[in-house]
Image (cartoon, coloured by chain):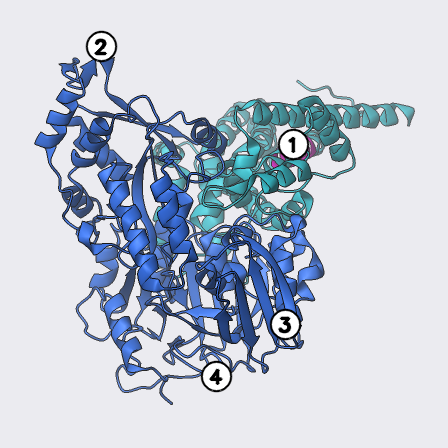
Chain colours: A cyan, B blue
Amino acid sequence: MPALLRVVVARLGAAALVVWGAASCAFLALHLIPGDPVNAIVGSNSLVGDEQRAEVRHHYGLDQPLAVQYLRYLLRLAHGDLGDSYQLQQPVSSVLSAQFRPTAELALWATLVAVALAVAVAVLTSGRSRLPRRVSAAIELVVVSTPSFWLGIVLLTVFSFRLGWLPVSDGDDVRSLVLPVATLALPIAAVLIPVVREGLLRALEQPFAQTARARGLAEPAVRVRHGLRHAALPALTLTGWFTGTLLGGAVVVEDVFARSGIGRVTLQAVEGRDLPVVQGVVALSAVVFVAVGALIEVLYVLVDPRLREGTGVTAA
Amino acid sequence: MRSRRTAPLEAVLLSVLVLVGAQACGPGADGTPGGSGPRTGGHLTYAVKKEPDCWDPHTSAQDVTAFVQRPVFDSLVYQTPDGELEPWLAQSWRTSEDGEVYTFTLRQDVTFHDGTPLDAEAVKANFDHVTAKGTRSQYAAGLLGPYQGTTVTGKYQLEVRFERPYAPFLQALSTTYLGIASPASLKAGADKLCSGTDSVGSGPFKAGAYLRGQQRQYTRNPDYHWAPEHAGHSGPAMLDSLTLRFIAEDTTRVGALTSGQVSAIDAVPANQAPMVSRDPHFGILTMDVPGVVDTFFLNTRSELFSDVRVRTAFQRAVDLDAITKSVFQGTGTRAWSPLAPSTPHSYDAALEKSWPFDRALAGRLLDEAGWTGRDAQGYRTKDGRTLTVVAPVYGKPSLFSQAVQGDLKKSGIRLDLAASTDATEVAGRLAQGRYDVVETSWGRADGDMLSHFFLTTEGSATGHNFSRVSDPRVDDWLRRAQASQSPDERAANYAEVQRWALDQAAVVPAYVVKAAVGVNRKVHGLRLGSSAWPEFYGAWTEAR
């Protein structure tokens, strides 16, 4: 047990370090840009006198030296307080928590769809015939090289504006999730498919696959039950890595599909230089990255029995 | 039941609603299409390009905030689409002899959405909120100008005092920024008011659920019976409910309209307008936005532009007619004055055609000023320096400014569109005067907009005096206009300022900003108000 405790504590320490590093980088990068943030706060077409400006500066603590601002920021961050947004004039934590669900929903579905699609296509195209593989590879290339902004617009135009099957965006309508999820999932699936297929093909050349076939197991069962497990590890690593892609993609997808979410807020915040919100998003992303990393490690162990202790086999 | 409308207003509507399309009968222009009359009930979904940052009109400076909160908040004064002021929550008002005190008498039959009645104390609470330090008002407090204080002189009577005569006050009062909220709701705190979930006014619609990034709902206020005379309708609103959806992406917004998923949208891009208006199911409402048109403000104190000859050359070297025509695909209007023709009681029509495009003149002036050399790219030079005009741009330079850039090149002037995605960097440049020209516009249906751009006290750091003008005559004209209660006298003074700005080549007015609202033809009675944003009060939809 102490060993486990040590692992957990080390993990949490490392996680805190990652969040601290990300938050500090964001703080420094944003504050080192020359110019007066008060100008960004009051906006362009506004009527604000010098006295009001001083009040704004004081309210956000911008009249303090940078070092003091930084320490205050860290102290607040440690308490889970992300400060007040310059533009929305609300606590960043409440803005982000209100916007988290739609983005999480989008990212989760996109991941599931991408993985399911990747596995299905890889299994179907890992047979002896080369033609399906070639066709699939060509499509993958096209999808990967399509900017997601454009992909989203095309899907919208065809399925929503022309055919009228799916709504653009409607908070209450589940169908409005289909196109955004597809826009996010397709490029990810297109990267995953060759990885899974490659792993699958290599596994199927192994002697254990021959053995399974010799036992009279049907080809689909050989691929799914025996091959897939071997192909899963690299794919899993890649899927975790896609967390970043999902966050970046959410910005584009939420804008095109007029969905609410973290991406939309981030875009607005970056444009208006809403520092507290940008810093909040960076801190949140760091936490998500750490969490996904931990989850992936647990999944490794679940997928690969060789990684479990006491099974008597060691990882290759 | 037909909506009540007076004859002059009908004429105004016909003049402001330009319907692009084949059908003579369009939304908003006529109350009786295809035999079916105005209908109570129904729902309207309207897609807006922008979403307010802060929903408290007392705090926010965004025009979209004024728009989205207009259905919820009434004002003391109403400004009709043609710019006239008339009673609304204030039944009547009078101005003191010296013009420093306004006395308002309120309607006595108005209740806020939370059930509390409107009285003088409530109005005072609103002005106190606008001017309170903690509100950090970005616009409303500025609109109050030399405001001194408010005194309640009776249950329904109050006096508003100013340090000096301030005639623009009444128009300012008609904007949503000085809209009257329930005094109880104002105590919720800045973050609540900004979040848009605690808006309580006395308007024809009550604020409903709001999800940031998605939509805001509104429901009809069944008790509403205090509409201003020329609102185009009386009694409760026709629509049962209203939804504003926030769709930033142009293609998505237009697609949502043309596929029937929303009933109307704002900001139809010029390149998609023909596609929308060709379709018999849709129309486009357009209106010139009153206030300051899209204008190049020349920094009269920069090294380059301190020479009036160079400024005049810049002014006359651009073929604005041709550029406006091509960029806005024939739907644009070039400007002759820094004020839009639709700005009430202040536009100087005499300026039209008074400073036509004249590239030869520009060339002569530049020769005189010593810019006689040429570099390898054909730009003019003087003492080995290229004639470069620095224009800080926030974000991406517009198609229009790129076209101007191309045109100036023909006169040997290099327009450097110093694009930056960082608002603070641009603001810093402006504050330090490190620029030659700033291109901007600002809508407001009052000639006093000129004060924000030309008063000496404004400056380019915290104000909007981008031309960095400091001329006692200009200050005098602007102060006189602010002090006069006579619309004609105000107009005469504003005309002086407009003429001066063009004579001095302190500005190059470029094009008149237009609102373009795409509307499904099943929607009627939707009209553009004085600020060129739609008013939903009289709107109704045909039964599906």
For residue B383, the mark is: 2
Q: Is residue A206 above or below residue A61?
A: above
Write down the quadrant of residue B426 in the picture.
top left
Q: Position of residue A128 (x, y in %)?
A: 41, 31
Q: Which residues are magenta?
A: A281-292
For numbered disc 4, what is the local secondary structure? loop
Label 1 vs label 3, nearer the camera: 3
Magenta stretch contains residue B470: no
Which residue in the structure is indicated by mark 3? B120
For residue A62, the mark is: 1
For residue B235, the mark is: 4
Disc on the earlier residue, 4 or 3: 3
Label 2 vs label 1, nearer the camera: 2
Confirm whether residue B543 shows in the render: yes
Identify which residue, B49 or B262, lies in the foreground.
Answer: B49
Residue drawn at 57 percent across, 35 percent down: A38
